[in-house]
Image (cartoon, rainbow, N blue to C red):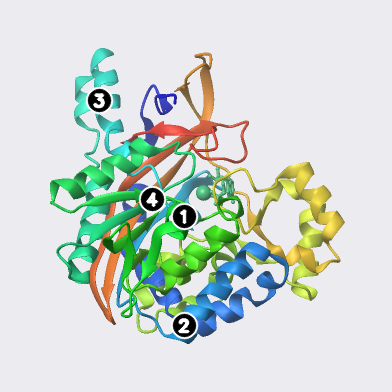
Amino acid sequence: QVVNYAPFTLLPSAVPSALFEQAYAVQQDFNLLVDAISQNKEFLEHTLASTIKVDDFTARLFRIHMQVLEEGLAQSVFLGINRSDYMFDCGADETPALKQIEINTIAASFGGLTSRTAAVHGLVLKVLGKSKEASRLLPNNPSKGLALGIAKAWELYGSQNAVVMFLVEEVQRNIFDQRCVENELWNRNIRVIRKRFRDVFERGSLDDAKRLYIDGQEVAVVYYREGYVPSNYDQQNWEARLLLERSRAVKCPDIATQLAGTKKVQQELSRPGTLERLLPGRPEAVARIRATFAGLYSLDMGKEGDKIAAAAIADPDRFVLKPQREGGGNNLYGEELRQVLEKIRDSPERTSYILMDKIKPQPAMNYLLRAHSPLQVTECISELGIFGVYVRQGKEMVMNKAAGHLLRTKAIEHADGGVAAGVAVLDTPYVV
Ligand code: ADP
Ligand code: MG
């Protein structure tokens, strides 16, 4: 086993204060929206109908969702931990605007490690003789915010002896990020266990009341840090996932909430009238959410899809082509976008993708510190994420919060990819 440091920028990056505040202000709205989608069977069914015909992974998740609904939900407490990601788009008039890249509703990571980055950058600034600037870095502690949500869900589940189970990867590359959240739970006297899908398959079971047990311990909360890409699953792991979803345990997220985070859902949300239907009686929330949307386009078969496919083939640098995948490195840009789209433009295969306007942030200079990588000043762009946490019991929202932020920065030559993909590094916003 090898221990390595997480990559980070040498210096914090400037973030416009108005956009930073806007991102925080819209987070509770996004929490409500994701939660509303997860409870709206018709919306998910209708929205994902074309996608599940061609995308096997989304289809399998969807089948579990339907099966669990048919059996009747055993779960009555719901916990959402998401991260809404943005870039600062510099349009024609050069004033940056907050534009959402995506919202992650499963395994949104780096809340733990980023709880430490402000201290790192504060020290660097002091060493550079910039104590005044160091004191302006904002405190940020998502690990605590995430843990408070998990603790609330654990408490409402209502069994003193039950544990929180982190469902973790086969090969654990980001364990310390998870440990930060775990330690906050131990500090509150909540027991945490770490298991993989295969442990659940081999030793997990449900009792008559659909309580989940593993190794003799009752599980109150399942916190997924795995299960968001096809390679996480073989047949046994799918069976384990089904068992977890059928149980009474609070899943973070439940499968409906995972589906609410698909790129196809994101694209359908941008259609006129959709947000209003999902959040009735909340015009202000709808306006705040809509203000963050970039152009998003369906590639479903028909005139609308034909037209946008032709536009993207003619001018690929205006767009990003996105499949229903998470984790970075899956999107297509530029010449590659054009070639792929040309090949599939007349085939239903195109409906497994969406098109999105490409966001163009203003680059800034920084140093990216990464093991085994040369140190040089680099032209970079940043992506701001806000963590959202909410807990619902039956129909009642009992917690709805913004739980901190994450700034990730990468060299401009990488169109795609996050920290886990080895492209972006951890950063701290210097709000200006
Ligand atoms: P994933 O689920 O794989 O993380 P994202 O939608 O977050 O997918 O895209 C991955 C990365 O690609 C982002 O972190 C961002 O750097 C880049 N990206 C995604 N969408 C856009 C866009 N519309 N404009 C510019 N860059 C984008
Ligand atoms: Mg992403």
For the residue marked with disc 4, what is the amino acid?
Answer: Lys
Residue beneath disc 4 = 195
Mark 2 or mark 3, whichever is nearer to me: 2
- Residue 315 appears left or right of 331: right
For the residue marked with disc 2, what is the amino acid?
Answer: Leu
Residue beneath disc 1 = 197
N-term-proximal mark, 3 vs 1: 3
| Element carrying mark 1 | helix
Q: Are there few (<14), some (14-19), or many (20+) residues within 10 Å of tag 4? A: some
- Residue 196 appears left or right of 164: right
**What whole-number distance in Å separates the C-alpha atoms at marks 4 and 2?**
26 Å
Residue beneath disc 3 = 122
Residue beneath disc 2 = 69
Find residue 217 and report its image quarter.
bottom left
Tell me if the residue at label 4 has its CB under 8 Å from ligand 1: no
Find residue 178 and report its image quarter.
top left
Q: State the residue at coordinates (56%, 68%).
A: 61
Q: Are there few (<14), some (14-19), or many (20+) residues within 10 Å of tag 1? A: many
Mark 4 or mark 2, whichever is nearer to me: 4
Q: Are there few (<14), some (14-19), or many (20+) residues within 10 Å of tag 2? A: some
Find out whether the residues at labels 2 and 3 contact each other: C-beta distance under 8 Å.
no
Q: Are there few (<14), some (14-19), or many (20+) residues within 10 Å of tag 3? A: many
For the residue marked with disc 3, what is the amino acid?
Answer: Gly
